[in-house]
Amino acid sequence: MTIPDNFKGLDNIEEYKENNKYKYFAKSVTDYKEAIQVQKDIRKLYPDAFVVAFKNGKKIQLKDALNE
């Protein structure tokens, strides 16, 4: 996997294909509070960063993940 140059400065970039588009995620965590902290840190470089949830390798609604 080749990570686009504009992600320099971030570690642990993961690639995900959705609707024939590649999307990139930084830092996989299992705790929501930690995810919010990571989001705050990443927003210093990428103001539009947001939290997403995955279950068994598939993207799910964040609200569903929070209810589990």
Image (tube, helix red, strand yellow):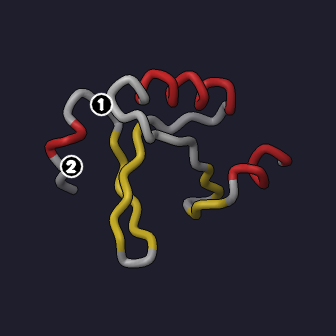
Residue occupying image coordinates x 51% and y 30% = 39
What is the x, y in percent for residue 2? Answer: 17, 53
- Separation of marks 1 and 2 at Cα, in angstroms: 10 Å
Say which residue appears at 38% left-offset and 58% top-offset.
Answer: 23
| Depicted 55 relative to depicted 44: above or below | below
Mark earlier in primary sequence (1, 2): 2
Residue 17 point in image, percent of width and height = 39, 68
Q: Amino acid at mark 2?
A: Ile
Local crowd size for mark 2, using a 10 Å CA cut-off: few (<14), some (14–19), many (≥20): few
Please indicate whether residue 56 sits to the left or right of residue 15 in the image. right
Among all residues in the image, which is located at the extreme left? 5
Question: Above or below — where is 19 with respect to 12?
Answer: below
Q: Which mark is residue 10?
A: 1
Q: Is residue 6 above or below residue 40?
A: below
- Viewed as shown, does residue 25 lie left or right of 59? left
Relative to residue 20, is residue 54 drawn left or right? right
At 78% from the left and 44% from the top, the residue drawn is 66
**Residue 9 location, quadrant:** top left
Graded by Cα atoms within 10 Å as few (under 14), some (14 to 19) or many (20 or more), the crowding at tag 1 reads: few
Q: Choose between 52 and 14: the one closer to the eye.
A: 52
Image quarter (top left, top right, bottom left or bottom right) of the N terminus: bottom left
Residue 3 is tagged as: 2
Image height check: is 4 above or below 30? below
Q: Judging from the image, what secondary structure is the residue with disc 1 in? A: loop
- Please tell me which residue lies in front, 40 or 30: 40
